[in-house]
Image (cartoon, coloured by chain):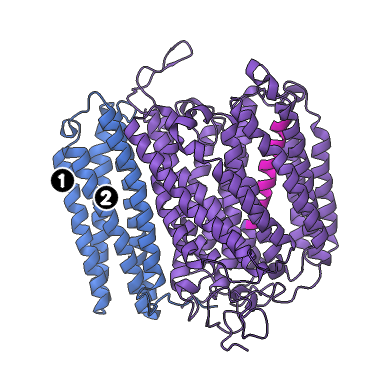
Chain colours: A blue, B purple
Amino acid sequence: MQIPYTVEPRPDTGLHNAKIGIWLFLASEVMLFGGLFSAYVLLRTGSIVWPEGSSILSVPIGTFNTMALIASSVTMVLSWAALKINNLSKFKMYMFLTYFLGLVFLIVKVVFEYLPKFEHHLYPSESTFLAIYFTLTGLHALHVLGGVIVNIYFWGPGSKMWETEPERFTNRVEVAGLYWHFVDLVWIFLFPVLYLL
Amino acid sequence: MTEISRESIWTKYIFSQDHKVIGLQYAFTALFFLLFGFALMMIMRWQLAYPGKPIPADGFIWVIALLGVVITLIGLFHSKKNLITLSGIIFLFMTWILIYLTSGEGRMPEGIMTPDFYNSLGAMHGTIMIFLGVVPLLVGGLGNYVLPLQIGAPDMAFPKINMVSYWSYFLGGITMLVSFFVPGGAANSGWTSYPPLSDLATTGQTVWLFGMVLLITSSLLGSINFITTVIQLRAKGLTWMRLPFFVWTQFVTAFLLLLAFPPLEAAGVLQLMDRLVGTSFFLPSGLYVGTGPLPVSGGGSPLLWQHLFWFLAHPEVYVLILPAMGIVAEIIANNTRKPLWGYRSMVFASIFLGIMSFIVWAHHMYLTGMGTTMTAFFQTTTMIISIPSVIILSAFFISLWGGSIRFNTPMLFALGFLPMFGIGGLTGLPLGLASSDIYLHDTYYVIGHFHYVVAPGTIFALFAGIYYWFPKVTGKMMDELLGKIHFWGSMIFINGIFLPMFIQGLAGISRRLYDGGESYLHAQDVLFWNEVMSYSAWGLGLMQIVFIINFVLSLRNGKDAGSNPWKATTLEWSAASSPPIEHGNFDKVPEVYRAAYEYSVPEASTDFIPQNQKEVK
């Protein structure tokens, strides 16, 4: 049995199936994080005191991580572009950089941010600010982890598909890229909201 | 191109990627949960009719057990042995759970229900009926099976994701069942799980939240699949305005599931944090529990949960009703032998309904003391959203006009849907206006209103759909006589349950009373209705046994249906009856030449022209 339009776009919509699928998934992700951001707004406007983000969180570390994620988004695009010009080794290099930067983000997040907080007894149960900080960044970190796993798969065993179905593989990388950019974008909202405002 | 080979029984029937098998998996699991959720309610109705008296549950449980044994036996001597035997075993399993529930210390010591257990049953009845019963049957079951056939597709766009969606739903269901066995019993803070109560509730609530996360994941994956399938896999010539109305309603529903569920997932994550990590998202400062202040940081807002919850749960109501309208549309067009009246206005009404459903949620929250500006806004949007429902319902009524109606079982259920949903909708208007809602909210009136929409409304439409598509799935017709007994019996009993609720509600009986109002002076005049409602509920239970018998016997002895027994126009009837699992759905890829409901075209020789027939002859 064959499902049409898994690779080639449907003429009247101009899209292949997975591309619609990922955009729909991202729409639901917008609603997920949108729900959490509105929770943040409601809790903050309802509170009597709300700490300055920078008094608890480290802005330099946050900035570094922001840079790491933005850079990884760029390399993600480059890896897809490399496939478009049929250069698999270049794809592998950029894909490696992408998930490497993702891992850097996660390691910095856990080792230099979460663990020192715990050492100073700054747990989620301490205050509403810390609660929403840990929830939002924790959920985002899980999304980064998911993206890293997918990217490692396409860099490693998944790239075998390039031999048999190059076009489909390129589509897959593009779809993974859309997700990766979204995760990046969420952080670009999270960083100012939590660290700077 | 995806090449899917199906080899063993495991990949063919268990971890199947075929939309028809997955649809059946969904349908059977959902039917089981519908019956189970209904059984919980039948136990509660004993307590409401005879508060504090020991339950003679044995009789009722033995009926189910007997049914299990009989079905298992039939299964053992039948060609479709696996399926029927499995159903029999499921019945026996259910008997065991019910015996467990109606006995034991924390639940019903010596057959007398404890108040906590009553709360647990109420919460789980709501959760199971909505999230594990009706929606999976409407969308996962009928949607999965029928929608790809109706649009002439070989399968869903993402077969693997479809499979994962079912198994995620299945695990969610198992999680909910398991929660009955954890210390403290299942969740007991209502199906709405309002904090602070739910934040402080027993372990069952945590299990409930994990179950919900699995169910949300399932419906998310399903909705992505449905939308992509409708956009991408429509047959050649099947333009948007030629789609059967059922497809349209499933399409809009999928958008509601996609966009409304994530905020509940967010809320679920926050409540899990509250319960497991000790945060105070929903716990305000200075909360006293028992003898002292609660040792939490405070600063949270219980209202935050209500907003996030109802942001899901109002669109959810339309998830429950839209596909039901889709089923009714198919059956009415088919059995009046006329095109639907106002097809286009129905389509646009359902899209408008979908959009509006996102901005009416706070009409569930008038009692929270929100300001007049907010109230005015949500009153206005609520009144506006009744318009598209009225458009669709009016179109149905006008469609009946002048038709030579065939009163078969699916049509009876579809016709029953119209006035029942009408009552449900009209009784909702006083609830949409804050001034009357303040009196009526938290009374049985609300329960009556909601159940009229969902039970004789949606569930009747579901039965209509099952009777209508049964021949397509199995190749056999269901028995008409038993079907009519099922319909008329259900119709009488279901009104016996829900109509008195309006009377009790207007008399001011709270909907959460464990003794059904016995200890309240103002309830005495309307107290006798409790017995009427309870007997009606048990009568309704008996009527469903007629349905189960009809189902099993028709599978065994039903008349052969052929591929198009109803002389219908839509594409699913041009596929073979009981379409094979191994291949795509159609012998040759269908092409569509006309609108969905070309019945009684004057120049044609037959009174229906299938969508894939090119010339009028």
Q: Looking at this rendering, what residue extends furthest in the front direction?
A: B402
For image coordinates 13% across by 41% down, the residue present is: A60
Which residue is identified by label 1? A63
Q: Pointer 1: residues within 10 angstroms few (<14), some, or many (20+)? A: some
Q: Point out the stretch of residues depicted in magenta.
A: B27-46
The amino acid type found where label 2 is placed reads Val
Q: Main secondary structure of the magenta part?
A: helix
SS type, badge 2 = helix
Which residue is identified by label 2? A186
Q: Name the foreground residue: B420 vs A163.
A: B420
Residue B53: where, in percent of width, then height?
A: 77, 22
For image coordinates 39% across by 74% down, the residue present is: A161
For image coordinates 53% across by 55% down, the residue present is: B322
Residue B42 belongs to the span the image colors magenta = yes
Residue B100 vertical placement versus B148 (above, below): above
The amino acid type found where label 1 is placed reads Thr
Mark sitting earlier along the chain (1/2): 1
SS type, badge 1 = helix
Q: Name the foreground residue: A83 vs B165.
A: B165
- Please state if B486 lies on the left or on the right of B394 as rendered: right
Whether callout 1 and callout 2 share a subunit is answered: yes
Q: Name the foreground residue: A51 vs B613.
A: B613
Q: Pointer 2: residues within 10 angstroms few (<14), some, or many (20+)? A: some
Residue A114: where, in percent of width, then height?
A: 27, 37
